[in-house]
Image: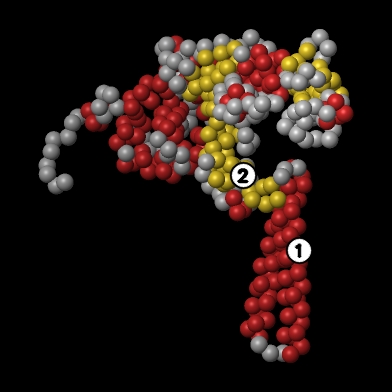
Amino acid sequence: RRQKILFPQSIDEYIPQDAPVRVYDAFVDALDFEQLGIKVEPNKVGCPQYDPKIMLKLLVYGYSYGVRSSRKLEREIHYNLSFIWLTGGIKPDHKTIAQFRRNNKAALANVLKQCARLCIDLGLIEGNTLFVDGSKFRANASSGNNWTKERCFKHLEKIDNRISEILSECEQIDQSECNDSSMVKMKDELADNKTLRKKVVDILSKLNKEDTKFINATDCDCVRIHSRQGSHAGYNAQTVVDEKHGLIVGGDVVNDNFDHHQFAKQVNNANDTLGKKAKAACADSGYSDIDELEKIDKQDIKVVVPSARQATEKKPREFDVSKFEYDRARDCFICPAGKVLEYRNAEVKKRRKVYRVEKTVCQVCQYFGVCTTSGHGRKVTRLLKEDLRQKLER
């Protein structure tokens, strides 16, 4: 390290021509800052501000490599050669970086949109076929900090009981006038329990106000996520990619544990980013909520999403509903034994119609006990939007 060398004349010679940082530099230079909503005022009176383009390059490049903290970004522009090259040697402090981020939140959200538009112009994104999927990410919080109304009530009961015990013990100590140190300890514990009680009451109040099932005391935005790694506090990150090269054209983070109600929202957001309507939208069976699929189907976008029954590997049972023939003209089902199941009622919440066979007819059938064991007779259901589901399944 002490060997004497002749330094190149410019820092540019330290950065290879194929270095990724050069792509970020060119990309931000190609953005329309007026459309992003970032003001560039080269002739502004007073102390000149740091070039907004350089500040945006710093944030976008840093975020791409997982450097999000303004203090860590400040460290990078002092010691990381690619950051020094990208910023041209300027060294804004962490407060300046944080302020630029705060003042341009909307602009940062629009960078993805302009990135997608640029990729369309370069022929990297076609925007014809989109794929939607969700990924579960752990939150920086423990699921042990999840509070429900029931848990709050239980803790309040325990805390109130303990406070009563402490007050009783303090009274006994006062009367006996001994063991002063224990009295101090009791007062400390009493204060701790009163503080804990206030915290739990505040959480309970928030649960009632927001009408939510539970709140995480560490990260109030996260939810209980069920994934292959088990149950934990986290988020459901939604991603939409273009078919041609798998480039991301839409991203969102939601608090829903499942993907059922996300399809239409994510596809519409991606279409807005692309500035045009896709020809086809695809997802796995986790998105097969018929109401969500209908919203996209009505836009004349081809929906390629398997239903739950298509996705399962189980073979249908001998008397599965798929074995029953639907008579559209009479709005009834014909069972494998030739018996008629007539329409009885609609289950509005489940968005389906119920069909039953007369119980006396069912009970004397040769298949009774195999087809059904219900004393009310066999029941089958049909979605109110069954025709649409069958169309999408095809």
**Residue 79 placement (x, y as % from top left):** 31, 42
Type of residue at label 2? Arg
Residue at horizontal 81%, vertical 17%? 332
The number of callouts visible is: 2
Horizontal relation, residue 184 to residue 110: left or right? right
Q: Is any part of residue 41 visible from this angle?
A: no
Tell me, yes or no, if residue 122 can be seen here: yes
1 and 2 marks in contact (CB < 8 Å) = no
Quadrant of the rendered image containing residue 21: top left
Query: Is residue 132 placed above or below 197 in the rendered structure?
Result: above
The residue that appears at 62% across and 37% down in the rendered structure is 257
Q: Nearer the viewer, residue 154 or 162?
A: 154
Which disc, if any, is residue 224? 2
Residue plotted at (44% across, 15% down): 244
From the viewer's side, name the closer residue of 98 and 295: 295
**Vertically, is 238 above or below 341?**
below
Specify the quadrant of the image occupied by residue 121: top left
188 left or right of 276?
right
Q: CA distance from mark 1 to mark 2?
A: 25 Å
Q: Position of residue 338 (x, y in %)?
A: 78, 18
Seen at 53% across and 18% down, the residue is 130
Give 54 or 152, whichever is nearer the viewer.
152
Q: Which residue is mark 1?
A: 157
First in sequence: mark 1 vs mark 2: 1
Q: Secondary structure at mark 2?
A: strand
